[in-house]
């Protein structure tokens, strides 16, 4: 019997933990306009609040990974879930802006503890041959949680704007208790080869030094595009609910429908057609097309006024981004054969940087003019398209011997 099959209960528990975390992250999206109205928050404060989560996660993720290596995966996962539950309850109960910031930062710390520990635990209980399948289960839980999070937030908020956060807190606490009772503390660790050990040594380099060294890597252009794409999407998503509320008077239900449908469509494309699209057109064409499409449709959001047009344009933005991100990840994985973990860490770091800077700038621009965040995102993504089109044949094409 395979390790993965013997440890299917553990994988299920890991999936539940990650699922709850990403539902909690998505809950806040459709509820932001109501919170702005309730607590008299402006766009700049919203941007900083959204960024606080990513800042905390970026700072604590490398530390959390080392802690899980020393203390074990299980205690770190349980601690992360308890901190996450506290952050959700605090966010729901807070009536002051400083406490909301603290709650979001705590959520980032909780996610930072859970993510590396869960991924490391999944790697521990799978062989090299089973690892892709095991990680696929974890990624499915992440995608599903993020897809339904905004929908749950929008629907449950009808009964009280704070109720979704209390529900997420209770779910997080229950998951921590179930994990404490049922998740094995000691596991049969699958064998690791020399290359994996080298990856772990390189990944232990301080984050700032990893970012500095990444300039010399053959996939640096991909990292730049990942940062810009994350920046543009964060601009779009951070003020999206505020924009829809201010400009069109959409309810939380309307916003939840739009975001949930776009996310589901993107996930379906990833699961069914992504591989065929990439194999047929290649990374260069897919990446440049998605950059151009996302820039175009983000700007078009400013000019559409009917619900079905807003629905369509938003769907196309999410679809372009949902194809762009895995295309970049696939390209980077093909550009190296011995540093997959290290490359994944850099991918995450550049994504986090975009998720930090994007919301801060979007919030500041929103207070000046509600159209400015979308104009900036569109211009930046278009310039990235031009850069990619000009240099991408060299930097955005996988080596032929990697296929």
Image (cartoon, rainbow, N blue to C red):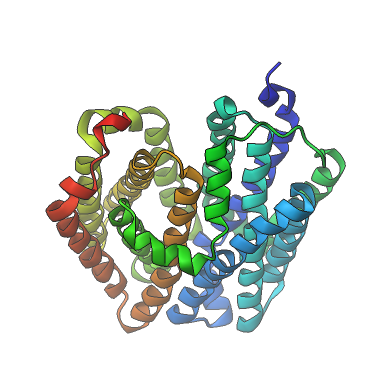
**Quarter of the figure with residue 276:** top left
Report the residue that reaches farthest toward the top. Answer: 1
From this viewpoint, which residue is outermost toward the right?
181
Residue, x 68% and y 63% (percent of image)? Answer: 88
Task: Return the x and y of residue 262 as percentages of the image width and height.
Answer: 39, 45
Classify the position of the C terminus by image quarter. top left
Residue at screen point 39% across, 28% down:
272
Q: Residue furthest left?
A: 390
Q: Is residue 128 above or below residue 124?
A: above
Please indicate, yes or no, whether residue 282 appears anywhere in the rendered image: yes
Left or right of 298? Residue 181 is: right
Q: Is residue 213 above or below residue 292?
A: below
As displayed, is residue 184 above or below residue 203? above
The answer to whether residue 153 is left or right of residue 334 is right
Q: Position of residue 79 (x, y in %)?
A: 77, 58
Q: Which quadrant, please, contains the N terminus?
A: top right
Q: Is residue 278 left or right of residue 351?
A: left
Residue 294: percent from the left, percent from the top? 26, 53
Instruction: Identify the residue shown where x is 19% and y is 54%.
Output: 388
Q: Nearer the viewer, residue 47 or 230?
A: 230
Q: Is residue 250 above or below residue 324?
A: below
């Amino acid at each position: 019997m395979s390790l993965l099959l013997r440890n299917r209960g553990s994988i299920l528990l890991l999936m539940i933990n990650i699922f709850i975390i990403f539902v909690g992250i998505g809950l806040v999206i459709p509820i932001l306009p109501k919170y702005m109205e309730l607590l008299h928050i402006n766009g700049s404060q919203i941007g900083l609040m959204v960024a606080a989560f990513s800042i905390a996660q970026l700072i604590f993720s490398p530390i959390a990974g080392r802690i899980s290596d020393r203390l074990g995966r299980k205690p770190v996962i349980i601690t992360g879930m308890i901190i996450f539950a506290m952050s959700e309850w605090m966010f729901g109960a807070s009536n002051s802006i400083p406490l909301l910031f603290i709650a979001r930062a705590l959520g980032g710390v909780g996610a930072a503890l859970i993510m590396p520990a869960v991924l490391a635990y999944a790697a521990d209980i799978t062989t090299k041959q089973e690892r892709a399948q095991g990680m696929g289960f974890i990624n499915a839980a992440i995608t599903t949680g993020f897809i339904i999070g905004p929908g749950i937030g929008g629907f449950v908020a009808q009964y009280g704007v704070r109720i979704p956060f209390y529900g997420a807190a209770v779910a997080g606490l229950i998951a921590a208790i179930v994990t404490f009772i049922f998740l094995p503390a000691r596991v049969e660790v699958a064998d690791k080869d020399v290359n994996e050990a080298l990856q772990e040594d390189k990944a232990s380099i301080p984050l700032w030094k990893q970012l500095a060294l990444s300039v010399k890597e053959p996939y640096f252009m991909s990292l730049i595009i990942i940062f810009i794409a994350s920046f543009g999407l964060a601009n779009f998503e951070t003020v999206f609910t505020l924009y829809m509320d201010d400009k069109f008077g959409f309810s939380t239900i309307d916003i939840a429908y739009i975001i949930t449908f776009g996310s589901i469509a993107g996930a379906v494309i990833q699961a069914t057609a992504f591989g065929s699209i990439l194999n047929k057109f290649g990374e260069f064409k897919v990446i440049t097309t998605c950059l151009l499409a996302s820039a175009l449709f983000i700007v078009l959001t400013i000019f559409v006024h009917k619900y079905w047009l807003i629905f369509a344009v938003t769907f196309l933005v999410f679809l372009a981004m949902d194809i762009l991100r895995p295309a970049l990840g696939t390209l980077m994985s093909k550009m190296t054969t011995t540093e997959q973990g290290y490359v994944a860490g850099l991918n995450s770091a550049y994504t986090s940087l975009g998720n930090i800077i994007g919301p801060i700038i979007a919030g500041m621009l929103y207070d000046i003019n509600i159209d400015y965040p979308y104009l900036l995102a569109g211009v930046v993504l278009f310039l990235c398209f031009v850069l990619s089109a000009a240099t991408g044949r060299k930097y955005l094409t996988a080596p032929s011997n990697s296929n």
